[in-house]
Amino acid sequence: MNKLLKIWVLAVLFSLVSTLAINSLSFAEAKFGYVDFVKVFNNYKKTITAEEKLGKKGKKKQVEREKLVSQIKKIKDQIEISSEKEKEKKKKDIAEKIKKLQEFDKKVSKELLKEKDDAAKEIIKEFDGVIKEIAKKDGYTFIFNQRFILYGDSSCDLTEKVLDTLNKRYKGR
């Protein structure tokens, strides 16, 4: 029984060593790369265009908001010179307008955030496609996000290649 256990342990060790040797051979043949996703995202023409578009929309909404605030201020100014009966009516009017303003703020914030998220998802989907394409074309086994790498030789940096490919394909500007 003791001899059988020794043979079994030796067989397990042999298969473990063989597996490690084969894996280390494959690992040595692997090709690695990394991408600075933040740099690509921030410098991609589509991201810049989307941010400009959102900025313009945000400014338009700010103008609308300022009109609502101006109406509230106007009513507040009128309260001082109003009779008691008119003051109560104007206070109710102010409360309604403040509620409308809060609803407006909430709605606009939600809309802009959704648009920003949708644009980011679309852009990230494009990144993913380009990265997979480069990996297959150039024989990369792994491509990592630079944020999670403690050290990477600059020869493995694919950031500019990914960014150039994305910007060449972008036709929106």
Image (spheres, rainbow, N blue to C red):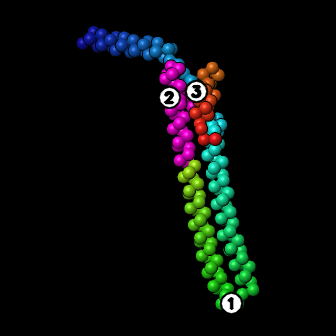
Check disc 1 and give the amino acid type: Glu
The span from disc 2 to disc 3 (Cα, nearest Å) is 12 Å
- Amino acid on which disc 3 is placed: Tyr
The disc label shown at residue 34, or none: 3
Residues in magenta, as a range: 117-145
The dot on residue 84 is: 1
Is residue 44 depicted above or below 31 in this figure?
below
Q: Main secondary structure of the magenta part?
A: helix
Residue occupying image coordinates x 62% and y 30%:
164
Q: Total of numbered circles in the picture?
A: 3
Quadrant holding the N terminus: top left
Give the SS element for disc 2: helix
Eyeballing the image, is 162 above or below 49? Answer: above
Mark with earlier residue (1, 2): 1
**Circle number at residue 29:** none
Mark 1–mark 2 Cα distance, whole angstroms, equals: 72 Å
Q: Which label's residue is closer to the chain start, 3 or 1?
A: 3
Residue 133 on the magenta span: yes
**Mark 3: which secondary structure?**
strand
Report the front residue among 158 and 173: 173
**Residue located beneath label 2 in the image:** 132
Please say if 59 is above or below 103. above
Q: CA distance from mark 3 to mark 1?
A: 71 Å
Task: Judge whether residue 128 is colored magenta.
Answer: yes
Place of residue 143 in the rendered image (x, y in percent of width and height, measured from the top left): 53, 26
Q: Amino acid at mark 2?
A: Lys
Q: Position of residue 56 (x, y in %)?
A: 66, 53
Viewer-side residue, 170 vs 66:
170
Q: Is residue 142 above or below residue 92?
A: above
**Percent coordinates x, y for residue 103 in the rendering:** 57, 66
Residue at the location (70% across, 71% down)? 70
Which image quarter is the C terminus in? top right
